[in-house]
Image (cartoon, rainbow, N blue to C red):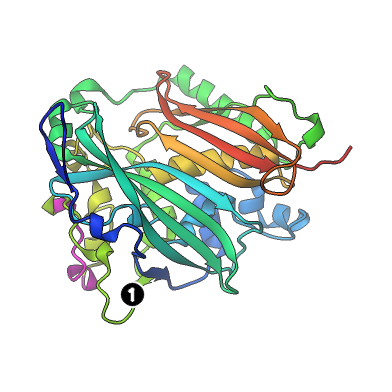
């Protein structure tokens, strides 16, 4: 229904969305299985220097016998990285940012040559007044990832935030007047590089903590990524397999019009042209056209309440997963993860990571001993951009 804010009298018209609640949506799939090169491209773009995922010799010498993908790579096996099934239906005058992800993994790893197929559902939504844009829609979409033999590999619930772009511009929470691109001194960069290298060295061999040796209150080594630039954002975008020309296809049932191809209510210059892209693939390339083009185009970013180029929510969730997995080592496994995105990573910022063991479960819902890690990602100014948790299985040997 149309939602009216009691505080501002602004209307968010969600009537078109209602017909899709609980329905299967977004029929698309990748053409090809994953390759070792794509796995390497992923960890390079995310600055995740774990030899298991890029170094052939080190990976062959490990318990896995060869290159494997990080669990975060599951999102790159999909069209839409979970966002698409949470952004269904026309909500006039809106734009979208990613709000968070929840993942359930069911064992196993992705290796070169593996293929996943997906089923996607629009789970529902709620409307809340926010300081960012007044009446704002928080919508959920579910993606089930299956192996070729039909076994369930992972499930993702993604949350999209759909907001009135003109109201976001008027309020200017992230407007260019309220922020500038930080310039880093040589001394500051030296310190960032030191923290980055210390983290890489903290568990390069992939040692896994014993469950009995881990104590509530233990902290994870500090990590840093950045400074973020349009170049790093572009690398992240291209690391998603869907964003390479020609890697996926629509596969809706015969006679079915996939709602993912319909106008979502975005501004005209932030909408894909699916017909034009058959000749010119840039027309369906989010670095140039479509809803995500504001990430790298400052003029477009300013139209949607963002003061400049900014990063991707899917990258932040991957950073969280990789951070926990690196601490857990080769013998650890993330069974469940949940993140909330508090604000984007903007150009010029760096992202600092901190993590802490907050609970231990000798008998967990996953059927094995686990620990729960809480994570927090912040900027150089101390602003929180992500909070998360992860349940991780560890060896239980005395």
The quadrant holding residue 271 is: bottom left
Question: Which residue ends up furthest to the right in the rendered image?
Answer: 398
Q: Nearer the viewer, residue 324 or 372?
A: 372
Q: Is residue 210 above or below residue 146?
A: above
**Residue for badge 1:** 252
Q: Is residue 78 rendered to the left or right of residue 265?
A: right
The x and y percentages for residue 82 are: 40, 54
Residue 197, position as x, y percentages in the image: 60, 31
The percent coordinates of residue 323 (x first, y second) are 58, 37
Asked if residue 234 can be seen in this view, the reply is yes
- Label 1 sits on a secondary structure element that is loop
Name which residue lies at 47% across and 24% down: 189
Residue at left 18%, top 64%? 273
- Residue span colored magenta: 269-279
Which residue extends farthest bottom? 254
Q: Does residue 271 show up magenta in the picture?
A: yes
Is residue 79 toward the left or the right of residue 148 in the image?
Answer: left
Please say if 188 is above or below 236.
above
The foreground one among 156 and 351 is 156
Which quarter of the figure has residue 67? bottom right
> Does 357 sit above or below residue 63?
above
Whole-percent x and y of residue 285? 28, 59
Above or below 370: residue 134: above
Dividing the image into 4 quarters, which one contains the C terminus?
top right
Q: Is residue 34 visible?
A: no
């Amino acid at each position: 229904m149309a939602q009216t804010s009691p505080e501002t009298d602004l209307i968010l018209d969600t009537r078109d969305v209602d017909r899709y609640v609980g329905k299967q949506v977004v029929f698309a799939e990748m053409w090809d299985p994953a390759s070792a090169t794509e796995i390497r491209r992923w960890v390079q773009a995310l600055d995740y220097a774990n030899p298991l995922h890029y170094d052939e010799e080190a990976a062959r010498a490990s318990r896995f016998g060869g290159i494997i993908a990080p669990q975060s790579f599951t999102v790159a096996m999909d069209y839409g990285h979970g966002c698409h099934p949470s952004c269904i239906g026309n909500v006039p005058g809106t734009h979208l940012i990613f709000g968070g992800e929840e993942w359930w993994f069911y064992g196993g790893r992705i290796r070169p040559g593996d293929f996943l197929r997906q089923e996607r559902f629009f789970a529902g939504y709620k409307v809340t007044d926010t300081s960012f844009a007044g009446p704002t829609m928080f919508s959920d979409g579910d993606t089930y990832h299956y192996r070729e033999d039909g076994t369930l590999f992972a499930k993702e619930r993604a949350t999209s935030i759909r907001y009135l772009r003109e109201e976001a511009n008027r309020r200017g929470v992230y407007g260019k007047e309220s922020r500038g691109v930080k310039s880093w001194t040589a001394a500051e960069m030296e310190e960032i590089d030191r923290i980055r290298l210390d983290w890489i060295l903290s568990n390069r061999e992939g040692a896994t903590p014993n469950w009995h040796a881990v104590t509530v209150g233990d902290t994870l080594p500090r990590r840093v990524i950045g400074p973020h630039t349009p170049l790093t954002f572009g690398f992240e975008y291209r690391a998603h397999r869907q964003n390479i020309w020609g890697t996926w296809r629509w596969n809706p049932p015969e006679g079915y019009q996939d709602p993912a191809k319909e106008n979502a209510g975005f501004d005209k210059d932030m909408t894909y042209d699916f017909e034009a892209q058959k000749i010119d693939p840039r027309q369906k390339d989010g670095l140039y056209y479509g809803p995500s083009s504001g990430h790298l185009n400052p003029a477009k970013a300013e139209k949607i309440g963002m003061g400049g180029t900014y990063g991707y929510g899917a990258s932040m969730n991957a950073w969280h997963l990789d951070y926990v997995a690196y601490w857990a080592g080769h013998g650890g496994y993330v069974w469940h993860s949940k993140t909330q995105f508090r604000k984007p990573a903007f150009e010029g910022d760096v992202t600092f990571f901190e993590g802490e063991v907050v609970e231990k479960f000798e008998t967990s819902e996953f059927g094995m001993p686990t620990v729960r890690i809480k994570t927090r990602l912040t900027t150089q100014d101390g602003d929180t951009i992500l909070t998360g948790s992860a349940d991780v299985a560890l060896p239980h040997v005395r």
